[in-house]
Amino acid sequence: MTAKLKDINLYLAEPRGFCAGVRRAVAIVEEALNRFGAPVYVRHEIVHNKHVINGLATKGAVFVEDLKDIPDQSIVIFSAHGVSQSVIDEAHLKKLVTINATCPLVEKVHQQIIKYAARQMEIIVIGKASHPEIVGTLGQIPGYTGIHVINSAEEAEQLQISPQKPVGFVTQTTLSVDDTAEIIHILHRRFPNIHGLQKKHICYATTNRQLAVKAIAKESECVFILGSKNSSNSGQLRNVALKNGAGKAFLIDDATEIDWRELDNISRIGISAGASAPEYLVEDLIKTFRSRYNKINIHHVIVTKENVNFKV
Ligand code: SF4
C-alpha cells in the first residue's frame, strides 16, 4: 500500500456500463436458471465480460462454444452477439430447447442483410470477420457469394465491385463511430448509390459511451476502461480515450489489474466501463482509489441520459 500522499480527481463518464441488450441477455440467463434450474447451457459467452460469466457460471450456467458439448434435449441460450442459421438448425437436430438472447439491435442488422441478399445486392459488412457478431450476421445468408467484409479505410478503397451492381452495407454494432464514419464516407464516394442506414448500425450504447469517453479524455491524464479484453466496445473506448487527449488509457477487468506506477505524478483520472461491464466494478475501482489517496474529488461528466430497455 502506497502512502496516502495526494488529492486526485476522478472523471466518471456517463453513460457507461451495461446497455439494454446486455441487461436483457443477462436477465434471460438468470430467469432461465430460476425457472428451469441448473444447468442451463449458453452458447458462447452471453456477453464478453469475465466477471459476468464467472457470476453466472457460479449460479449454474454452462458456457460452451460448440453445441456438440451439450446433451440432447437440454436448454440452450444463444448469446447477445447472435448466431448463424446453421447453429439454429443444429440445435433443432439435437432437440435442444432454444432461448435467443440476441440483442434486438443485432437482429435488425440480420434483417437488413437478408433483405439485401433477397435483392441480389453486393453486400459490404463493416466489422471484424472473426467477431461472433459478424460470424452470426454472415451466417444469416449462408452460401451468398456477393459479400465483402472490411474493417479499414484501406480495405474500403481496395474493394473490387462492379459499378453496375447494386450495393448495400451494414456495420457491426460496436465499432468506433469515427473510424466507421470515415469508411462509410469512402463507400459513398466509391459507390454513390450505395444503400445503408444514414446513422449506420453502430448502436446507441456504443455511440453514447464513446461520446462520454471523449469528454472525460479531454480532462484526464489517464483513463481506465473497465471491460474484458475480448469486448469489442470496451476496446474501442480505450482507443477513443487515446485519440481524444488522454495520455494513457488502460482496459482492465477490475481494480486489481492497475499498475499503480503508471499513476505517479498523475492527478486527473478518467473512468468508464464497456457495455458488458457491471457497475459494481466501477464502484470497487472508486473504493480502491479512496483507500490509496488522501482525498478524491469526483466529477460526473454526463453527455446524455439513456432510457432504453428491451423486454426479456
Ligand atoms: S452494445 Fe449495442 S448492440 Fe451490443 S448488446 Fe448492447 S445495445 Fe445491443
Image (cartoon, helix red, strand yellow):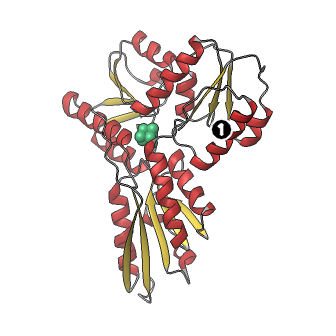
Residue type at mark 1 is Ile
Task: Report if residue 276 is visible in the image.
Answer: yes
Q: Quadrant of the C terminus?
A: top left
Ligand 1 - quadrant of the structure image: top left
Query: Neighbour class for label 1 at 10 Å: few (<14), some, many (≥20)?
Result: many
Q: In which quarter of the image is the N terminus?
A: bottom left
Q: Nearer the viewer, residue 78 or 181?
A: 181
Q: Residue 109 at x, y = what percent?
A: 50, 28
Q: Which of 47 and 156 is in front in this view?
A: 156
Q: Residue 8 at x, y = what percent?
A: 44, 81
- Disc 1: which residue: 184
Give the residue drawn at x 56%, y 31%: 134
Is residue 13 shown above or below 312? below
Question: Position of 239 compared to 83: left or right?
Answer: right
Q: Residue 261 at x, y = what percent?
A: 56, 77
Circle 1 — which element? helix
Instruction: Place residue 126 in its image quadrant.
Output: top right
Q: Which residue lies furthest to the left in this view?
A: 35
Question: Position of 294 compared to 191: left or right?
Answer: left
Give the residue drawn at x 54%, y 80%: 266
Answer yes or no: disc 1 within 8 Å of ligand 1.
no
Give the residue drawn at x 23%, y 34%: 31
Q: Residue 35 at x, y = what percent?
A: 19, 29
Give the residue drawn at x 49%, y 81%: 267
Q: How many labels does the image show?
A: 1
Is residue 28 shown above or below 226? above
Task: Report if residue 82 is visible in the image.
Answer: no
Is residue 67 shown above or below 105? above
